[in-house]
């Protein structure tokens, strides 16, 4: 089996250790029990020796109260809902992502604000 992501593992361990300072259920053993995986598997994920599946990464993100997209990206995975969106509109989404990929964070934030406003307009129209 291929190795996992060292960056993902380091981030999970960092977040878990931070939580452990105030909550004993975030020890490696207790956290692995909550995740329903072996402590050895959790350790191997955290060291980057084993990959974590998409569903497990999402579960970890929720328990650690962090952004699942960030953890998924560190594990070189994409949220299933994003896959569905891309599959439903492949040409439009591929074009959009290729165009947006060269933009700065500031421009992407501005674009997201514009898109949120458009989405709100659509909701208002549907509500009338």
Image: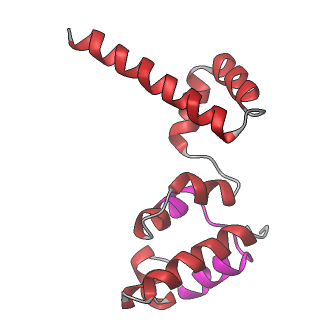
In magenta segment, residue 40: yes
Residue for point 57% across, 30% down: 110
> Residue 105: horizontal and vertical position, in percent?
66, 41
Residue for point 76% across, 27% down: 98
In magenta segment, residue 13: no
Q: Which residues are magenta?
A: 39-58
Looking at the image, residue 127 lies above or below residue 97: above
Residue for point 77% across, 69% down: 1
Magenta stretch secondary structure, dominant? helix
Quadrant (top left/top right/bottom left/bottom right) for the C terminus: top left
Foreground pick, 39 / 62? 62
> Residue 49: horizontal and vertical position, in percent?
74, 77
Q: Quadrant of residue 102?
A: top right
> Residue 122: horizontal and vertical position, in percent?
36, 14
Task: Tell me which colouring the rendered structure shows.
Answer: secondary structure
Q: Tell me: 45 left or right of 84.
A: right
Residue for point 59% across, 19% down: 89
Q: Quadrant of residue 23?
A: bottom left
């Amino acid at each position: 089996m291929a190795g996992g992501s060292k960056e993902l593992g380091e981030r999970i361990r960092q977040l878990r250790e931070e939580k452990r300072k105030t909550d004993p259920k975030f020890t490696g053993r207790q956290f692995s029990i909550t995740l329903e995986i072996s402590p050895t598997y959790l350790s191997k994920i955290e060291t980057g020796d084993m990959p974590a599946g998409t569903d497990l990464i999402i579960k970890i993100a929720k328990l650690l109260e962090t952004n699942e997209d960030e953890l998924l990206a560190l594990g070189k995975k994409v949220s299933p809902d994003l896959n569905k969106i891309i599959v439903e509109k492949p040409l439009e989404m591929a074009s959009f992502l290729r165009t947006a990929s060269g933009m700065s964070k500031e421009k992407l934030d501005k674009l997201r604000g514009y898109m949120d406003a458009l989405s709100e307009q659509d909701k208002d129209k549907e509500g009338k």
